[in-house]
Amino acid sequence: MRTADRSPSGPGPELRAAVAGLATPFGVLDARALRHNIDDLRRRAAGTPIRVASKSVRMRTVLSRVLAEPGFAGVLCYALPEAIWLRRTGFRDLVVGYPTVDRAAIGQLGADDELASQITLMVDDPAQLDLIDAAAPWPGRARIRVCLELDAAYRPAGRAVTLGARRSPIRTPGQATALARHIAGRPGFSLVGLMAYEGQIAGVGNAGRHPRAVAVRAMQHRSAAELAERRAAVVAAVRKLADLEFVNGGGTGSVESTVADGSVTEVAAGSGLLGPALFDHYTAFRPAPAAYFVLPVVRRPARGLVTVAGGGWIASGPPGSDRLPTVAYPPGLRYLGTEAAGEVQTPLRGSAARALRIGDQVWFRHAKSGEVCEHLGELHLVDGGRIVEPLATYRGEGKAF
């Protein structure tokens, strides 16, 4: 079970003191850690522009401040309604990272030339173009910008084994060329980009000497080499048919290997800004923990055992202990194997529980980035030992995408 001892560091006394009087539950964003992570991502990207993955942030104020920093440009959104909302509130260069079937949003996009000039949709199948045309027929709508997604999963044994996210059906230069030719011959669309997300490299921890970690690192090395060769061939083939504005790759966990691929013009990253707990298990980098959520102790069922209200903020992915929030403070608390993190209550045991009283605070870090914002209306930005301002999350602004 995950404990505070596995976290690279917990919240310091200055950070804890700044929010000691807040009513729980609440969220905290450490400004100093955020600045460190911005600088570290920029260093790792080595001059390659970073497109910010909005699903890993889900706070407009943070998105805008990061994009004002040198080295960051554009947003990788996760829904078309989100991209439309962000554009109408001042954001530019928005790529929707997943295909959309939201007919109402497609209709809004097609009816607004300015929106359509700033938003790019993801495609990997002619049927997705059919749906767009049905929702916003051509002629009579704006030209739609599209990005072709290349599947980046690693298949060391052909179709028998797939390591990585199962995303696009497009894997080869021939398949990509066929779809690019279809788009080029279809009125009302412009192919402007290509994307490949290497989740098996960017999203899997590899730290340690145990056999699994050694195997993961070996797989990631081979996968990066295979993808670099395949992606370069696909990009070269597609460029013969389309004037690509960008080739996007990566994720926070694969920045170095992605920017080393000469066919890539920009890297996607977002989780590294907030430093979630899954990154505690990477060898190449270690972002500073920047985002926390804090819950109150409401029960003391037994000696060495306390219960906090809520806590079951489980991260997406295959169920397992690595998807649970990490107890960040006080150190020495751990979950019960029979209950783990619950929707309405979470029992915790350990030596630290003996000193905790009803109403005391327990600090957690979410396993992944951004998802914690679905549970909170705001995170309190803390800098220099004081609360600077509350930062509204998407949820706090009444948005659920």
Image: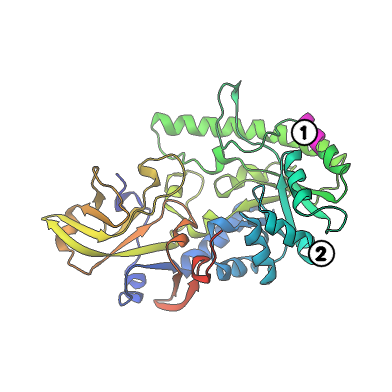
Q: Which of 80 and 86 is in front in this view?
A: 80
Position of residue 144 in the picture relative to residue 28 (left or right): right
Q: Tell me the tag on residue 391.
A: none
Main secondary-structure element of the magenta-colored stretch? helix
What residue sits 62% from the left and 55% below the top?
Answer: 79
Question: For residue 250, which quarter of the picture?
Answer: top right
| Location of residue 42 in the rendering, given as x and y in whole percent from the top left corner | 61, 58
What residue sits 18% from the left and 64% below the top?
Answer: 356
| Residue 189 in view | yes
348 up-or-down from 158: above or below: below
Q: Residues within 10 Å of mark 2 (few under 14, many from 20)?
A: some
Q: What element carries label 2?
A: helix
Which amino acid type is marked by label 1?
Answer: Ala
* Residue at mark 2 to residue at mark 1: CA–CA distance: 33 Å
| Residue 246 in view | no
Residue 93: in magenta span: no
| Location of residue 348 in the rendering, given as x and y in whole percent from the top left corner | 23, 53
Position of residue 335 in the picture relative to residue 233 (left or right): left
389 up-or-down from 301: above or below: below
Which amino acid type is marked by label 2?
Answer: Asp
N-term mark: 2 or 1: 2
Position of residue 119 in the picture relative to residue 143 (left or right): left
Query: Which residues make up the magenta segment?
Result: 174-179
Q: Which of 104 and 31 is in front in this view?
A: 104
Q: Tell me the tag on residue 113.
A: 2
How did the renderer colour the structure? rainbow
| Location of residue 325 in the rendering, given as x and y in whole percent from the top left corner | 36, 52
Provide the residue designation for mark 1.
233
Q: Which of 293 and 108 is in front in this view?
A: 108
